[in-house]
Image: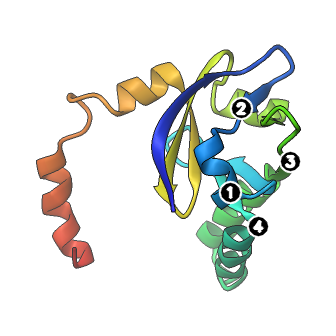
Amino acid sequence: MLIGEYEHSLDAKGRLIMPAKLREDIGEKFIVTKGLDGCLFCFSQNEWTNFEEKLKSLPLTNKNARDFVRFFLSGAMECEIDKQGRFLIAGNLREYAKLEKDAVIIGVGTRLEIWNQANWKAYNSDENISADAIAENMTMLGI
């Protein structure tokens, strides 16, 4: 399971270190794409296949579905971890997530998210996140 929070810096070429604790679960090759909330999503090959199947099942006749599929697939790229434990994030994805120097990689179960460090701190702040409010809303999802 992909869990935890890890802070790393991108190098001048746009490479980021994949934390050692996450490498086995994410795999040597994985998919990075635009995510929601201004971050990037990283999927193992297996999880990407599952996600892709869900996208394929969306109705082509529905504009929202087409937009959703385009959003995730247009920026998707396969990444590979090098011998130093780094992987390259394409320029368009770095631009989308505002990744310049400091980044945070978080595990959220079936995927990783890569955040600009300042954006993650703002998103994760007490002013933005209320555990009680989130818990109340989860009853609608059966949790």
Q: Which residue is mark 4?
A: 45
The mark lying in front, picked from 1 and 2, is 1
Residue 25 occupies quadrant? bottom right
Q: Which residue sits at x=12%, y=61%?
A: 136
Quadrant containing the C terminus is bottom left
**Amino acid identity at mark 3:** Glu
Tag 3 or tag 4, which sits nearer the N-term?
4
Tag 2 or tag 1, which sits nearer the N-term?
2
Q: Secondary structure at mark 4?
A: helix
In this view, 36 is above or below 125: below
Q: Which residue is mark 3?
A: 80
Tag 4 or tag 1, which sits nearer the N-term?
1
Is the Cβ of the residue at disc 4 closer than 8 Å to that at disc 2? no
In this view, 140 is above or below 90: below
In space, the residues marked 1 and 4 are separated at their CA atoms by: 12 Å
The mark lying in front, picked from 1 and 4, is 1
In space, the residues marked 4 and 2 are separated at their CA atoms by: 19 Å
In space, the residues marked 4 and 3 are separated at their CA atoms by: 11 Å
Q: Which residue is mark 2?
A: 17
Q: Is residue 137 left or right of residue 54?
A: left
Q: Secondary structure at mark 1?
A: helix
Q: Position of residue 38 (x, y in %)?
A: 55, 38
Residue 64 occupies quadrant? bottom right
The mark lying in front, picked from 4 and 2, is 2
**Amino acid identity at mark 1:** Glu
Q: Which residue sits at x=50%, y=49%?
A: 107
Q: Which residue sits at x=81%, y=24%?
A: 14
Mark 4 closeness class: few <14, some 14–19, many ≥20 residues within 10 Å: some
In space, the residues marked 1 and 3 are separated at their CA atoms by: 13 Å
In space, the residues marked 1 and 2 are separated at their CA atoms by: 14 Å
Q: Which residue is mark 1?
A: 24
Tag 2 or tag 3, which sits nearer the N-term?
2
